[in-house]
Each structure stands twice: as C-alpha cells, then as structure tokens.
Image (cartoon, helix red, strand yellow):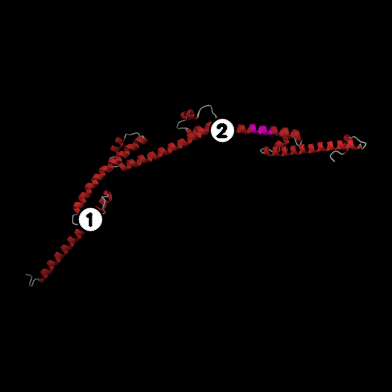
C-alpha cells in the first residue's frame, strides 16, 4: 500500500502514536483524578474499606464507585446536619443566647459548625463566670460568719447580686476594722498587765517608760517582768526561810542579841 510512500506511512504512524500517547496521558490524568475523588469520599464516609481496596474492587468502574460513595456521603451529611442541629438545640437550652435554636439555625444554615463553636465558647464563658461567682459567694459567707454584719449571707448576696466584688470589699473593710479594734483591746489588756507587774516588782523604770521602750513588743516585756517577779518571789521565800532558821538558832544559843537585831545587822548576808 505504501510502497514508495514510506515517508507518508511513517508520518501517519507517528501521528497515530502521538494521538495514542496523548489519549493515554489524558486517561491517566482522569483515572488519577477519580482515585483522588474516591480517597476524599472514603475519608468523609468511612465505608469500612480503604480507598485502595475499593479501587481494586471497582477497577475500570470508578464512576460507579464514586456515584455510590457520593450517595453514601449525602446520607451522612443529612445525618450529620441533624446531629449538629440537635447539638445546637441543646446548647441553646443551656446558654439562653437571646434567640431560639430555630432562629439561629436559620441564620447559620450551612454554617452549623460555626454556630456550635460560638455557642460552645459562650457556654464555657458562662460556666467560668458561674464558677467565679460561686467562689465569691463562698468568700462572702465566710466573711459574714466572721463579721456578723447584721444580715445573713443570703440576704446580702441577694442585695449585691452581680456586685459581689463590692460586697466582699465592704466586708473585708469591716473585718479589718474589727481586727484593729480587737488588737487595740488586746494591747490595752497587755498594758494593764505591764502596769500591774511593774507595781509588783519595781524594776527601776516606770510602766510608761517600759511601754514606750517595748512598743509593739509588749509580750516580751510581760515575759521579762514575769520572770523578774518569779525570781523576786523565790528570793523572798528563801529569805523568809533563812530568817526562820536564824530565829530558831537564836532561841537555842542566846547570843546576847535578839534575832531581829542580828537579822538587821546581817541583812543581805
């Protein structure tokens, strides 16, 4: 047929080869795209078999496989949307965002994930606020127990609902005032103890001088004066015992002087 026209034959065959190669490339690209689509659908639908298993089973029938997976995905999307709508309704019941679940679902149709995210954030914020409020209420109850302000904790919490910080601040001021008053009362009591001890032991300085020197250290002053008092009492007891011994010995020995004369002569010796 092509005797003497070999160049034409080569030209035709080369064109045929190029056309076949182009068709093969296009077919490979199309098959790769279908494989990619199958993989994506398998990820979305999770049909129980891997994409490779399904592609092997449907080799040459990828279009049918994609159609089946798309049907499955459509059903899944419907089910997912119903589940998301249920989640939205539950979150709306918990958070009371100011709109009904149906109003929000209409507003966010097709964007249910964004709606759920927003409502979940709102719920977390509300829970944190409630937790913080509970802590503040507990602080109020503790302060009321300590201060006895004339109203119960529940009455005050009702009056200061949403203003718990101000209530706590007021109660803490009241507590500080009461503590200062108690400190003043305690300090006055210690000062009276010091004055009584000074009258008893005569330490060489007046009570007021010692209180000035030991300002803020009244406990140490009381401790020192108490030790001094105990030492003086012990010395007095010992001296009394010694005087009794002298009197007994004078009665026995008749040294020519009375016991009192001798004790006066030997006072401190």
Q: Nearer the viewer, residue 214 or 57?
A: 57
Q: Is residue 211 visible?
A: yes
Percent x, y for residue 136? 48, 35
Q: Nearer the viewer, residue 142 or 232?
A: 232
Q: Earlier in the sequence, mark 2 or mark 1?
A: 1
How would you classify the magenta stretch by its main secondary structure? helix
Are the residues flagged by discs 2 and 1 in contact, CB closer than 8 Å? no
Q: Is residue 33 visible?
A: no
Q: Which quarter of the figure has residue 221? A: top right
| Residue 7 placement, left or right of 155 | left
Q: Which residue is mark 2?
A: 175
The circle drawn on residue 55 is 1
Above or below for 184 versus 53: above
Quadrant of the snapshot with the N terminus: bottom left
Extent of the magenta region: 185-191
Above or below for 67 versus 156: below
Residue depth check, mark 2 versus mark 1: number of the one nearer the observer:
1
């Amino acid at each position: 047929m092509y005797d003497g026209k070999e160049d034409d034959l080569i030209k035709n065959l080369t064109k045929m080869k190029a056309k076949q190669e182009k068709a093969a490339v296009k077919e490979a690209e199309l098959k790769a795209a279908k494989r990619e689509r199958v993989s994506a659908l398998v990820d979305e639908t999770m049909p129980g078999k891997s994409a490779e298993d399904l592609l092997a089973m449907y080799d040459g029938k990828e279009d049918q496989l994609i159609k089946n997976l798309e049907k499955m995905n459509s059903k899944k999307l419907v089910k997912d949307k119903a589940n998301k709508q249920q989640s939205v309704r539950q979150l709306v019941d918990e958070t009371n965002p100011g709109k009904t679940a149906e109003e929000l679902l209409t507003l966010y149709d097709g964007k249910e994930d964004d709606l759920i995210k927003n409502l979940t954030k709102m719920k977390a914020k509300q829970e944190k606020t409630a937790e913080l409020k509970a802590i503040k209420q507990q602080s109020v109850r503790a302060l009321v127990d300590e201060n006895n302000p004339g109203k119960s904790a529940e009455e005050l919490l009702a009056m200061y609902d949403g203003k718990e910080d101000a209530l706590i601040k007021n109660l803490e001021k009241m507590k500080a005032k009461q503590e200062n008053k108690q400190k003043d009362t305690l300090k006055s009591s210690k000062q009276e103890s010091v004055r009584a001890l000074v009258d008893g032991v005569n330490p060489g300085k007046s009570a007021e001088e010692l209180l000035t020197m030991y300002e803020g250290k009244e406990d140490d002053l009381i401790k020192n004066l108490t030790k001094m008092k105990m030492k003086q009492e012990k010395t007095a007891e010992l001296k009394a015992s010694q005087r009794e011994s002298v009197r007994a010995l004078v009665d026995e020995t008749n040294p020519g002087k009375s016991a009192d004369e001798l004790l006066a002569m030997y006072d401190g010796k």
